[in-house]
DNA sequence: AACAGTATGTAAATATATTGACATAATATG
DNA sequence: CATATTATGTCAATATATTTACATACTGTT
């Protein structure tokens, strides 16, 4: 009689996978909880932190389009829309109509936003990093980053495949 | 003149930490997006998947208290309350008053919930694991798990410290 | 130039997830 | 035993984040 549907190796992999994804799930929860707390005095959240991190890069000196931001942060444009609206209301960013495409919006940091980011948020974020990675060697961090990117690449493929055919081809 | 506020090593660590947390942020987003899609035909989400995973353990044979579940999943009780309400409405779980403590609630899986979990959700979850970890060796998975747990432990400490003193001592 | 397809942004509905404030029950301390 | 503290759960407000559906603008082909 057949007990193991696969070969036994698969069963061990599944149990490992289960533990891995459970820990990733917990990490995701705690990242947002502790991360948002770290910058809450500035009125920021982890998402807004990610947006400001993206906009503060030298590459984004002239601003970023909304589509560009959604691809960079891997969130839907519908979600980003709300986040940006709140950040605009807070005066951290500015939304201007795109130059070439009349549909698009160009997102840039305001002076006030840049001040909050560099003078208030960044020091707290660095302190956050120090605590969260206190017992990580540079090698540990490099390896962790490697595995996260490996996993990310696979999940990106799954995301693309799903988005292409929600019901099969039209 | 002083350019680097720390010693140069710290600067390299900060940049590594920045990349690491950005990738963790993206992983968290994609985990919920692709994970929920994997079980959406069963009307489940990644959170409900985590709850059913917890309740289906042999250890939880006789059900779990709500506080027990919040500590296990590392979410707030206010959050879990809503998730459980939806799962109860869907008939996946049952909520009974606690035996000893009149405030507490005992959460158990229903027969219907157990059927959905084992017959429909689990096969899809295993397929999900296979795709997400397709190029991970057992060693890769073990190391990834190790680093996630290491990070989790640090963030847990930060979470506890914050919860103890939201404003400093009373 | 007309027209199909695609890209971009918004609106509404639903599900997480947090904090703050409240009520109630159990526990500890005097 | 009375009281202070703690534990447990709920309600309300706010911020993510997704899906579906829609409006508009650009692109490519014919």
Image (spheres, coloured by chain):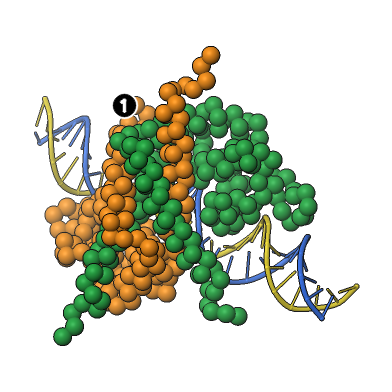
Chain colours: A green, B orange, C yellow, D blue
State the residue lying farthest toward the top.
B1
State the residue lying farthest toward the bottom.
A1
The quadrant of the picture occupied by the N terminus of chain A is bottom left
**Relative to the observer, which residue lies in front, B70 or B9?**
B9
The residue lying at 50 percent from left, 70 percent from top is A162
Q: Which residue is mark 1?
A: B170
The residue lying at 73 percent from left, 45 percent from top is A96
Find residue A69 and report its horizontal and vertical position in percent: 60, 50
Image quadrant where residue D3 sits: top left
Find residue B90 and report its horizontal and vertical position in percent: 36, 71
**Relative to the observer, which residue lies in front, D23 or B104?**
D23
**Relative to the observer, which residue lies in front, D1 or B138?**
B138
Kindly state the secondary structure of the residue where label 1 is placed: loop
Q: Chain of mark 1?
A: B
Residue A120 appearing in the image: yes
Image quadrant where residue C29 sits: top left
Instruction: Decide if residue B50 is on the left or right side of residue A78.
Output: left
The quadrant of the picture occupied by the C terminus of chain A is bottom right
């Amino acid at each position: 009689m057949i007990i193991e549907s696969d070969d036994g190796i698969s069963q061990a992999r599944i149990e490992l996978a289960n533990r891995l994804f459970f820990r990733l799930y917990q990490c995701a929860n705690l990242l947002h909880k502790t991360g948002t707390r770290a910058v809450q005095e500035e009125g920021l959240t982890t998402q807004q932190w990610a947006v400001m991190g993206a906009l503060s890069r030298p590459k984004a000196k002239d601003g970023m389009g909304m589509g560009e931001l959604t691809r960079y942060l891997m969130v839907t444009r519908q979600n980003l829309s709300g986040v940006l609206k709140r950040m605009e209301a807070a005066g951290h960013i500015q939304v201007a109509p795109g130059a070439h495409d009349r549909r698009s919006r160009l997102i840039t940091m305001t002076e006030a936003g840049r001040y909050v980011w560099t003078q208030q948020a960044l020091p707290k974020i660095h302190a956050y990093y120090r605590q969260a990675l206190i017992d990580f060697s540079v090698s540990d961090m490099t390896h962790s980053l490697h595995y996260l990117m490996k996993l990310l690449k696979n999940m990106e493929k799954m995301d693309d495949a799903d988005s292409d055919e929600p019901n099969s081809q039209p």
